[in-house]
Image (spheres, rainbow, N blue to C red):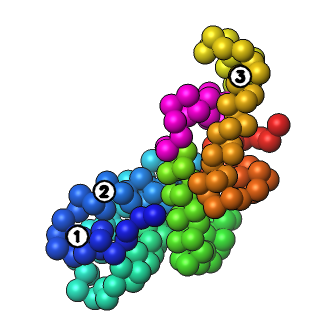
């Protein structure tokens, strides 16, 4: 579990390292998702602007929750501005309303869920993480993984079952269907086989 209060206190004292070490990758993923594939290369700009704006306005932030909401709102607003500018430039006003209506509270919950998922994946032991990467991130079939790792295909299947069990346990005992939906939603899994 992330200690946002400690990161907030460090941030308020001008120490940015804890923010960048713990939260930065999640903030980048949030910004990239807000921007969409075509504009995701601007995610870092959105996050940097949000961090700077949050730091400049830090005197108005009363606690860690307010601080996180403010930072996510800054990212949301900056991404929305980029998307709108792009759409005006192309004379296309399609999905702007959907982006504009996103609720920051929903975004916070979603981001915390994704952070938990990525933390659970990162904590997998090496042999399981390797199978996860090859299977879910690279989309290889069990036979291809077995050939690459020079192990039996049944071993690949058992490792996949075990790593899914470990992920479900680390995510609070969610069901296999919920885990698959979460992996799909995070863009890690492109199809359920």
Disc sitting over residue 10 in the figure: 1
Number of other residues with Cα within 10 Å of mark 3, as a class: few under 14, some 14 to 19, many 20 or more = few
Secondary structure type for disc 2:
helix
Q: Is residue 63 above or below residue 149?
A: below
x and y, in percent, of residue 114 in the image: 56, 58
Q: Residue at x 26, y 81 (%)?
A: 57
Q: Is residue 103 above or below residue 14?
A: below
Q: Residue at x 77, y 41 (%)?
A: 191
Is 143 a magenta residue? no
Of tags 2 and 3, the one toward the viewer is 3
Is 123 a magenta residue? yes
Disc sitting over residue 20 in the figure: 2
x and y, in percent, of residue 163 in the image: 64, 39
Number of other residues with Cα within 10 Å of mark 1, as a class: few under 14, some 14 to 19, many 20 or more = some
x and y, in percent, of residue 98 in the image: 66, 71
Q: Could you tell me how far apart the alpha carbons at marks 3 and 1 are, in whole angstroms?
A: 46 Å
Residue stretch rendered in magenta on the structure: 122-139
Overall secondary structure of the magenta stretch? helix
* 73 to the left or right of 129: left
């Amino acid at each position: 579990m992330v200690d946002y209060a400690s990161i907030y206190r460090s941030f308020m004292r001008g120490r940015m390292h804890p923010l960048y070490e713990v939260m930065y990758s999640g903030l980048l993923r949030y910004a990239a998702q807000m921007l969409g594939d075509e504009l995701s290369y601007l995610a870092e700009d959105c996050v940097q602007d949000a961090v700077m704006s949050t730091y400049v306005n830090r005197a108005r932030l009363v606690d860690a929750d307010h601080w996180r909401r403010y930072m996510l709102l800054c990212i949301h607003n900056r991404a929305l501005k980029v998307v709108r500018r792009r759409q005006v430039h192309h004379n296309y006003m399609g999905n702007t309303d959907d982006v504009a209506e996103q609720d920051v509270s929903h975004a916070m919950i979603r981001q915390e869920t994704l952070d938990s998922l990525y933390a659970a994946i990162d904590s997998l032991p090496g042999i399981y993480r390797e199978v996860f990467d090859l299977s879910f991130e690279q989309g290889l079939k069990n036979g291809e993984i077995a050939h690459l790792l020079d192990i039996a295909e049944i071993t690949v299947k058992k490792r996949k079952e075990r790593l899914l069990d470990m992920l479900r346990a680390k995510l609070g005992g969610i069901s296999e269907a919920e885990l698959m939906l979460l992996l799909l939603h995070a863009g890690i899994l492109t199809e359920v086989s």
